[in-house]
Image (spheres, rainbow, N blue to C red):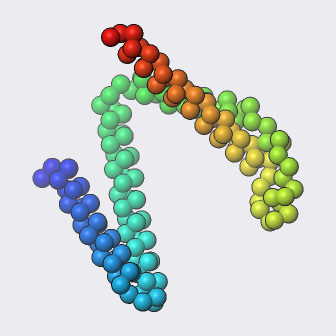
Amino acid sequence: MGLHKILKIVAFALAILGAIFALTIMAGDDDTALSMSGNMLYVTYAVLGIVLALVVIFVIKGLFAGDLKKTLLTVGAFAAVLFVSYGISSGTDLDLTPFTSKGMDIDEGTSKIVGAGLYAFYTLAVVAIGSMLLGGVRNIFNK
């Protein structure tokens, strides 16, 4: 049996199990709903674990089957964007007093990491939009 067929069977079995739990929650009383919602979480965790394991397996399989140099360059470029974003974020451009007065554990380091994430998101969004525009312009002029 092929891997695809096995995965389809596992996905179908988990879908049926999830549907049974969902119907039991909807049809039952409050005590049944509380006890079954825990079971629904276990099904969710199982599906998440299976999906993550398959993603890791197929990424590693594709990594060694494809061009390793190109993959490492892409990962390196992504890491460079993260390091530069972390370097340019200050972490001091926000008044932390309202957060600490509410009991939230936010300090300058947390603010710097959030700022780095925002800078990285903006940079990667501009690169993605630019590459789509460049591809569209090339398609227009190549026709």
Rendered residue at 43%/71% (across/down) = 41
| Quarter of the figure that contains the C terminus | top left
Examine the rendering and report whether any part of residue 77 can be seen: no
Q: Depth check: 28 or 51 in front? A: 28
Residue 76: give x, y in percent of width and height.
53, 28
Rendered residue at 36%/39% (across/down) = 60
Rendered residue at 32%/35% (across/down) = 62
Residue 22: give x, y in percent of width and height.
36, 75
Examine the rendering and report whether any part of residue 115 can be seen: yes
Horizontal placement of 38 versus 8: left or right? right
Residue 5: give x, y in percent of width and height.
17, 53
Residue 59: give x, y in percent of width and height.
36, 40
Horizontal placement of 137 versus 89: left or right? left
**Residue 33 against residue 131 in the figure, above or below:** below
**Residue 6 against residue 75 in the figure, above or below:** below
Rendered residue at 79%/37% (across/down) = 90
